[in-house]
Image (spheres, rainbow, N blue to C red):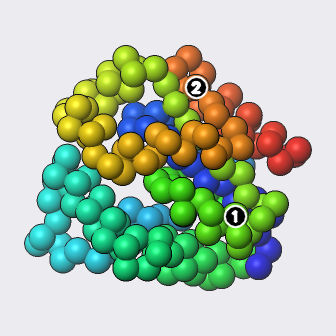
């Protein structure tokens, strides 16, 4: 494998993971590992829900797979398979890790290539961003996956507050953690 950089993003709902991931992809040619796409592919299209119900459906499926695979489902059949299938790609992005064991698995396999960045913002900003999408923020943050995702802050190599910074600046800060 020619992997040079492997970024794990974590953070609360509405913390800006999607926007930062887009900027990293655009500016630094990171290729995103699609864990949500993998989960969606496991659900028959006629059973796939919409909105907040879809989020919960995917979270529950991910939780079940976590139990069945010791959290390896995002690692082996998703990330490692994608990386091994594209040996010329040097920069990879996993958006988003939600559990401590997921971070541990990546660190065990990829060591110094890994950077784990946790994005955060004030509760007011998070609520506002999520509400703009029409979701039930209080229900979303009560889910155990959201609680777990927020707790990853203490494991991160870098914690960035997205309240006032734009995605371009955040992407630059993330890139600089490799000394590039």
User: With 136 as the anchor, is 150 left or right in this view?
Assistant: right
Dot 2 corresponds to which residue?
Answer: 161
Determine which of the numbered discs, if any, sits on residue 87 in the image: none
Dot 1 and dot 2 residues touching (CB under 8 Å) = no
Compared with 180, 103 (above or below) is: below
Compared with 106, 117 (above or below) is: above
Instruction: Name the residue: 81% across, 40% down.
Output: 176
Determine which of the numbered discs, if any, sits on residue 107 in the image: 1
Residue that lies at the very extreme toward the right in this rendered image = 179
Compared with 124, 58 (above or below) is: below
Mark 1 or 2, closer to the camera:
1
Q: Is residue 132 visible?
A: yes
Determine crowd level at label 1: few under 14, some 14-19, many 20+ residues with C-alpha closer than 10 A.
Answer: some
Determine crowd level at label 2: few under 14, some 14-19, many 20+ residues with C-alpha closer than 10 A.
Answer: some
- Secondary element type, mark 2: strand
Q: Position of residue 69 (x, y in %)?
A: 43, 79
Instruction: Name the residue: 33% across, 65% down.
Output: 63
**Quarter-of-image position of residue 134:** top left
- Secondary element type, mark 1: helix
Q: Position of residue 86 (x, y in %)?
A: 66, 77
User: With 175 as the anchor, is 25 left or right in this view?
Assistant: left
Rendered-image quadrant of the C terminus:
top right
Instruction: Name the residue: 55% across, 26% down.
Output: 162
Front position in the image: 120 or 153 = 153
Instruction: Name the residue: 63% across, 46% down.
Output: 155
**Quarter-of-image position of residue 101:** bottom right
Disc 1 from disc 2: Cα separation: 23 Å
Rendered-image quadrant of the N terminus:
bottom right
Q: Is residue 29 visible?
A: no
Q: Position of residue 127 (x, y in %)?
A: 32, 24
């Amino acid at each position: 494998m020619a992997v040079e950089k492997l970024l794990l993003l974590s953070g609360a709902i509405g913390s800006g993971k999607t926007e930062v991931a887009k900027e990293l992809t655009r500016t630094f040619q990171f290729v995103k590992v699609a864990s949500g796409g993998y989960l969606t592919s496991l659900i028959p299209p006629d059973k796939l829900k919409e909105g907040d119900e879809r989020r919960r459906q995917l979270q529950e499926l991910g939780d079940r797979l976590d139990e069945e695979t010791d959290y390896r489902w995002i690692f082996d059949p998703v990330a490692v398979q994608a990386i091994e299938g594209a040996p010329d790609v040097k920069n990879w992005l996993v958006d988003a890790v939600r559990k401590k064991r997921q971070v541990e698995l990546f660190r065990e396999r990829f060591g110094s290539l890994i950077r784990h960045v946790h994005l955060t913002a004030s509760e007011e900003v998070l609520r506002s961003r999520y509400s703009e999408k029409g979701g039930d923020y209080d229900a979303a943050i009560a889910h155990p996956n959201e609680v777990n995702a927020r707790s990853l802050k203490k494991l991160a190599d870098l914690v960035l507050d997205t309240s006032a910074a734009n995605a371009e600046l955040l992407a630059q800060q993330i890139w600089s953690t490799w000394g590039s």
